[in-house]
Image (spheres, rainbow, N blue to C red):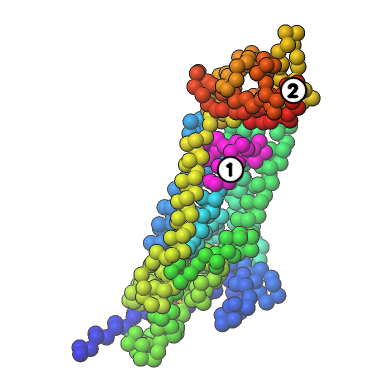
């Protein structure tokens, strides 16, 4: 059997990276499960100094983040059929998703849309782990691709930041710190206003900015509150938001299995980890039972949550792939194949199997498909208007001089479209007269109109058990909706009905 060519001796190994945490802290990496990566033994916060990262995954993330940031900041100003791309106006209970206005009456549709969103995340997590967190979550995108880059630009890379923090206060340090926090605050103001515009709409936000501040005290209070919250998150709280606040990281363990793609360390290839000595070949390492991991800790140094991915899948890992880039750079340097840390399933690493479409993914996908079908049915069968007819408070029926019986109703009608709708009502199943008390009715776009309706019937046509009426809501002769009610007469005493 031909002997394989000897592995070339690596030119030099990267020096072990300083820990991304405070250099003053000494960490025992073997007991990582017993303590948090960002807290010392007394429970005090360890401030992280993630090293600047470069590499192909980081490049792709950067492009992705530019796209997401553009959508995030331009989104409130994008209109579809005159409606916002996305608006969650909890105050006025008006919601717009992809330009479709949802009213409180559309709560079922809204709930289904939310279920689709959640099921989508579950399926995505089952297949691709927490890729959402590292690549698309606004918290990570803003922290790593905006605030972190500003920090690097002002204070330098991890080692310089650490040195700056340890140094005594000087005018230069004060200028750097003040400059950074001023920029952070300004950006937090912009982000806070963007969030506000997703809640109240960009038009209302512009009114708050332009008008006399005394007219929008509540809006201004929320502007300040959101700014302070975002400033606190990005200037101080940082990765703690992912590890302590966000529930997603915690329930991911229920969704991951051995076939889920995650950022994973190939322990079969990497262990036993050991420093690479000058002149040592990888054949010699293999003979000594040493793997490809040279324990340089570059993967730890770049991690924004301060963990060591070599310890296995951890709750704190947001799948940002920074450690992949760091390790690939090391592998290039020591002439070993890339991918010691890679995006792979645990099955792939343990048994070399390919990514599989599991039964669980199939069930989740079927549920998602069902929900999407239900949502589409609801959207396409949704009426342009939503009408409610209630008997006028305190009234039962009236008898006119000619003996006819009349009932007075209060009608509320919601126009869910982006255009005004003229409305007329007709009795569909019973002879009689129906009169809109306010005259012709035009319901303004996205508004609710209210009027009184008088229905007048011949007493001979009334049923003893209550007269059920069907009423058509028409616009330009086209039936938009059919509502029903019960007409009260002298020969029975029915309770009022709606809809
Ligand atoms: S996994 Fe890669 S980056 Fe991390 S310590 Fe080992 S060789 Fe270095
Ligand atoms: S372990 Fe790697 S992928 Fe996970 S958060 Fe740290 S750097 Fe990102």
| Residue depicted at x 60% and y 20% | 430
* Disc 1 packing (10 Å; few <14; some 14–19; many ≥20): few
Is residue 102 covered in magenta? yes
Task: Work out whether 418 lies above or below 379.
Answer: above
Q: Nearer the viewer, residue 214 or 427?
A: 427
Secondary element at image label 2:
loop
Q: Determine the residue located farthest toward the right in the rendered image.
A: 394
* Disc 2 packing (10 Å; few <14; some 14–19; many ≥20): few
Query: What residue would you read off at disc 2?
Result: 491
Q: Quadrant of the C terminus?
A: top right
The spot of residue 38 in percent (x, y) is 62, 70
Q: Nearer the viewer, residue 267 or 428?
A: 428
Could you give the CA–CA distance between mark 2 and mark 1, rounded to whole angstroms?
Answer: 39 Å
Q: Nearer the viewer, residue 248 or 65?
A: 248
| Residue depicted at x 59% and y 65% | 250
Task: Work out whether 209 lies above or below 140.
Answer: above
In the shown orientation, is residue 308 left or right of residue 328?
right
Q: Nearer the viewer, residue 253 or 285?
A: 253
For the magenta stretch, what is the residue range? Answer: 89-113
Look at the image and tell me whether residue 265 can be seen.
yes
**Quarter of the view holding residue 105:** top right
| Residue depicted at x 61% and y 14% | 440
The image's mark for residue 108 is: 1
**Quarter of the view holding residue 234:** bottom right
Quadrant of picture, ligand 1: bottom left
């Amino acid at each position: 059997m031909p002997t394989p060519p000897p592995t070339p001796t690596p030119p030099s190994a990267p020096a072990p990276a300083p820990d991304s945490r405070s250099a003053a802290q000494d960490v025992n990496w073997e007991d990582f499960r017993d303590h948090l990566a960002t807290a010392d033994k007394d429970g005090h916060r360890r401030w992280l100094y993630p090293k600047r990262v470069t590499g192909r995954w980081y490049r792709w993330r950067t492009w992705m983040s530019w796209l997401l940031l553009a959508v995030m900041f331009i989104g409130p100003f994008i209109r579809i059929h005159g409606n916002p791309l996305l608006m969650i106006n909890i105050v006025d209970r008006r919601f717009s998703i992809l330009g479709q206005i949802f009213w409180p009456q559309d709560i079922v549709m809204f709930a289904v849309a939310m279920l689709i969103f959640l099921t989508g995340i579950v399926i995505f997590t089952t297949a691709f782990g927490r890729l959402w967190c590292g690549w698309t979550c606004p918290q990570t995108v803003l922290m790593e691709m905006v605030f972190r880059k500003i920090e690097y630009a002002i204070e330098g890379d991890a080692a310089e930041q650490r040195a700056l923090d340890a140094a005594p206060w000087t005018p230069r340090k004060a200028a750097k710190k003040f400059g950074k926090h001023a920029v952070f605050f300004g950006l937090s103001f912009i982000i806070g206003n963007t969030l506000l515009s997703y809640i109240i709409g960009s038009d209302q936000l512009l009114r708050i900015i332009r008008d006399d501040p005394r007219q929008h005290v509540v809006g201004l209070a929320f502007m300040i509150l959101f700014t302070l919250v975002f400033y606190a998150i990005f200037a101080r709280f940082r990765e703690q938001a992912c590890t302590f606040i966000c529930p997603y990281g915690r329930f991911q363990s229920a969704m991951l299995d051995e076939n889920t793609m995650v950022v994973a360390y190939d322990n079969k290839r990497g262990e036993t980890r050991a420093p690479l000595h000058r002149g040592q070949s990888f054949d010699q390492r293999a003979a000594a039972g040493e793997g490809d991991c040279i324990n340089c800790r570059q993967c730890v140094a770049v991690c924004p949550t301060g963990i060591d991915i070599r310890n296995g899948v951890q709750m704190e890992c947001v799948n940002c792939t920074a450690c992949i880039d760091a390790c690939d750079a090391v592998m290039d340097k020591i002439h070993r194949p890339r991918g010691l840390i890679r995006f792979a399933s645990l099955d792939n690493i343990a048994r070399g199997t390919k990514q599989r479409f599991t039964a669980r993914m199939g069930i989740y996908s079927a549920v998602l498909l069902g929900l999407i079908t239900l949502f589409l049915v609801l959207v396409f069968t949704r009426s342009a208007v939503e009408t409610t007819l209630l008997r006028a408070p305190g009234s039962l029926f009236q008898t006119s001089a000619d003996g006819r019986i009349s009932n007075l109703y209060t009608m509320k009608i919601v126009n869910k479209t982006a255009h005004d709708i003229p409305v007329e009502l007709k009795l569909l199943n019973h002879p009689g007269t129906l009169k809109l008390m306010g005259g012709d009715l035009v319901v303004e776009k996205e508004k609710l109109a209210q009027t009184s309706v008088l229905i007048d019937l011949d007493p001979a046509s009334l049923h003893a058990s209550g007269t059920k009426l069907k009423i058509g809501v028409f616009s330009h002769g086209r039936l938009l909706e059919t509502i029903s009610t019960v007409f009260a007469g002298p020969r029975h005493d029915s309770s009022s009905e709606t809809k």
